[in-house]
Structures are given as structure tokens and as C-alpha cells.
């Protein structure tokens, strides 16, 4: 899913304001899983499946987790990416609808 320019600007504003009307429900650092020899994809997908409507999941990774983002794509789940530096990516997943 690609975001339009105004959507990206709105998301960046939310990030800078600390998500005033939304809550980051879960933080995950892929570095920890990878250092332990584990692949974080299954845990992240499980966490995203449990994410409530109006909630945000924040994932930190040492590389662009494109396959994970693709697997996580589903109706009602939006993501956006921030590349902080060459080896630090932040992916925010937002569940914009209530789970049925």
C-alpha cells in the first residue's frame, strides 16, 4: 500500500506530536530477536493480528523488513516507514479498524 503525500505529512505530524489520540500498544526490536538467532517475523505477525483498532505497533529493525511488511499487509492495517540511518529502520503499523 502506498501512501499519498498528504497522508505521509499527516503521519509525520502524528509522530512528531507523539500520537496524541492513538496509543503505541507494542514495541518490538528485531535486533534482539536476531541477536538471539531467532527470526522475528512470526512474533510480529502474531502481535499485529492481536492489535486493536486505533492502536499502533512500532518495530525497530537493522534493515528494511520488506518481506515482513508485505506479509503484514491486510485490509485495515496501514504501515509507514522511517529510515533513521543506514542500519536503523522504524516501521509503524496502525490498525485503523476494529477487529471483527
Image (cartoon, rainbow, N blue to C red):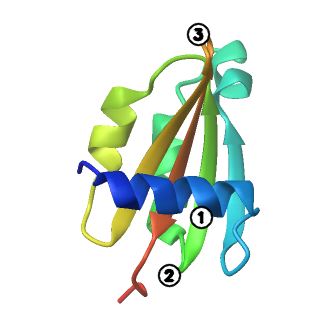
Please tell me which residue is depicted at 66% across the width and 76% down the height of the picture: 22
Kindly indicate whether the residue at mark 2 contacts the one at mark 3 (C-beta within 8 angstroms).
no
| Residue at horizontal 59 percent and vertical 10 percent from the top | 86
Locate the C terminus by quadrant. bottom left
x and y percentages locating residue 77 in the rendered image: 37, 65
Residue 53, label in figure: 2
Secondary structure beneath disc 3? loop
Q: Counting other residues with Cα less than 10 Å from the Cα at mark 1, is it few (<14), some (14-19), or many (20 or more)? A: many
Give the Cα distance between marks 2 and 1. Answer: 9 Å
Q: Residue furthest top?
A: 86
Measure how far apart labels 3 and 1 are at the Cα level.
24 Å
Residue nearest the viewer, comparing 72 with 6 = 6
**Which numbered circle lies on residue 56?**
1
Of the two numbered discs 3 and 1 in the rendering, the one whose residue sits closer to the viewer: 3
- Please state the horizontal and vertical placement of residue 56, each as a whole percent of the image: 59, 64
Label 2 crowd bin: few (<14), some (14–19), many (20+), radius 10 Å: some
Residue 80 appears left or right of 1: right
- Residue 86: assigned label: 3
Front disc: 3 or 2 = 3
Considering the numbered disc 2 on the image, is that residue within a helix, a strand or a loop? Answer: loop
Q: Residue at x 27, y 40 (%)?
A: 70
Residue 14 vertical position relative to residue 84 in the rendered view, above or below: below
Residue 38 position by quadrant: top right
Q: Residue at x 57, y 52 (%)?
A: 12
Other-residue count near label 3 (Cα within 10 Å), few / some / many at <14 / 14–19 / ≥20? few
In primary-sequence order, the first of circles 3 and 1 is 1
> Mark 3 to mark 2: distance in Å?
32 Å
First in sequence: mark 3 or mark 2?
A: 2
User: Residue 1 in the image: x percent, y percent?
Assistant: 23, 51
Relative image position of residue 82 (x, y in whole percent): 55, 35
Amino acid at each position: 500500500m502506498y501512501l499519498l503525500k498528504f497522508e505521509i505529512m499527516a503521519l509525520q505530524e502524528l509522530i512528531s506530536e507523539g500520537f496524541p489520540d492513538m496509543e503505541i500498544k507494542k514495541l518490538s526490536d528485531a535486533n534482539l530477536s536476531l541477536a538471539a538467532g531467532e527470526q522475528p517475523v512470526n512474533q510480529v505477525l502474531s502481535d499485529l493480528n492481536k492489535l486493536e483498532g486505533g492502536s499502533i505497533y512500532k518495530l525497530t529493525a537493522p534493515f528494511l523488513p520488506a518481506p515482513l511488511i508485505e506479509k503484514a499487509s491486510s485490509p485495515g492495517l496501514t504501515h509507514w516507514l522511517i529510515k533513521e540511518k543506514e542500519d536503523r529502520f522504524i516501521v509503524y503499523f496502525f490498525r485503523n479498524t476494529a477487529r471483527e
